[in-house]
């Protein structure tokens, strides 16, 4: 998305996320590393409870409060994504601007990078009087329904 202000490089890997923590002066604790590794391994949006359960199933010694506090710190610094949903907060590994395809039957959220045509953005700007510098789009649909 060329309209985005390129002040900060996007986080595209676990290494990028760990480096961003260091650049921001955040301590990369064992628990914080566990959480980031899991989010990059799983490549899906997870609740704090899901993250806690999966880490403990893998034998990682981490408490629920520690999971929640680290998720909040990482999302507040823009290192991970936090989505507010009716069922609660979900966390994902991609933190830069992107859109989502929300599957209504599987409850899956799929990250997609979409670039709208410049003419469409100009039309929206003309209609609203607002200069668009960034956007995120939520698409909704069914995976188990044939595409027509």
Image: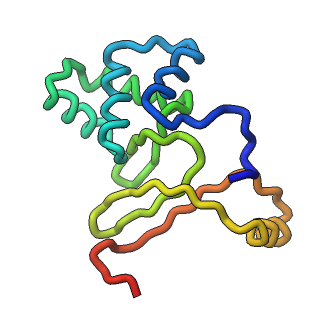
The answer to whether residue 110 is above or below residue 55 is: below
Q: Residue at x 46, y 54 (%)?
A: 111
Which of the 4 quarters of the picture holds residue 102? Answer: bottom left
The residue nearer to you, when weighing 73 against 31, is 31
Q: Residue at x 75, y 42 (%)?
A: 5
Indicate left or right for 113 with 147 as reference.
right
Indicate left or right for 62 with 36 as reference.
left
The answer to whether residue 90 is above or below residue 9 is: below
Q: Residue at x 53, y 40 (%)?
A: 95
The residue nearer to you, when weighing 99 against 75, is 99
State the count of labels: 0
- Colour scheme: rainbow
The image position of residue 20, as x and y in percent, is: 55, 23
The answer to whether residue 52 is above or below residue 3 is: above
The residue nearer to you, when weighing 104 against 69, is 104
The image position of residue 54, as x and y in percent, is: 20, 35
The answer to whether residue 30 is above or below residue 53 is: above
Which of the 4 quarters of the picture holds residue 30? Answer: top left
Indicate left or right for 91 with 41 as reference.
right
The image position of residue 59, as x and y in percent, is: 14, 23
**The C terminus appears in which quarter of the rendering?**
bottom left
Q: Residue at x 27, y 64 (%)?
A: 106
The image position of residue 77, as x and y in percent, is: 55, 27
């Amino acid at each position: 998305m060329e309209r985005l202000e390129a002040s900060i490089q996007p986080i595209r890997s676990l290494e990028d996320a760990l480096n961003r923590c260091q650049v921001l002066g955040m301590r990369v604790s064992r628990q914080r590393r566990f959480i980031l590794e899991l989010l990059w391994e799983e490549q899906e949006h997870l609740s704090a409870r899901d993250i806690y359960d999966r880490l403990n199933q893998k034998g990682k010694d981490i408490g629920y409060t520690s999971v929640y506090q680290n998720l909040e710190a990482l999302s507040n610094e823009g290192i991970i994504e936090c989505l507010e949903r009716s069922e609660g907060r979900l966390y994902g590994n991609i933190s830069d601007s992107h859109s989502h395809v929300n599957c209504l039957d599987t409850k899956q959220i799929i990250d997609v990078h979409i670039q709208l045509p410049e003419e469409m953005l100009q039309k929206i700007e003309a209609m609203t009087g607002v200069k668009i510098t960034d956007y995120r789009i939520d698409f909704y649909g069914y995976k188990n329904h044939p595409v027509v």
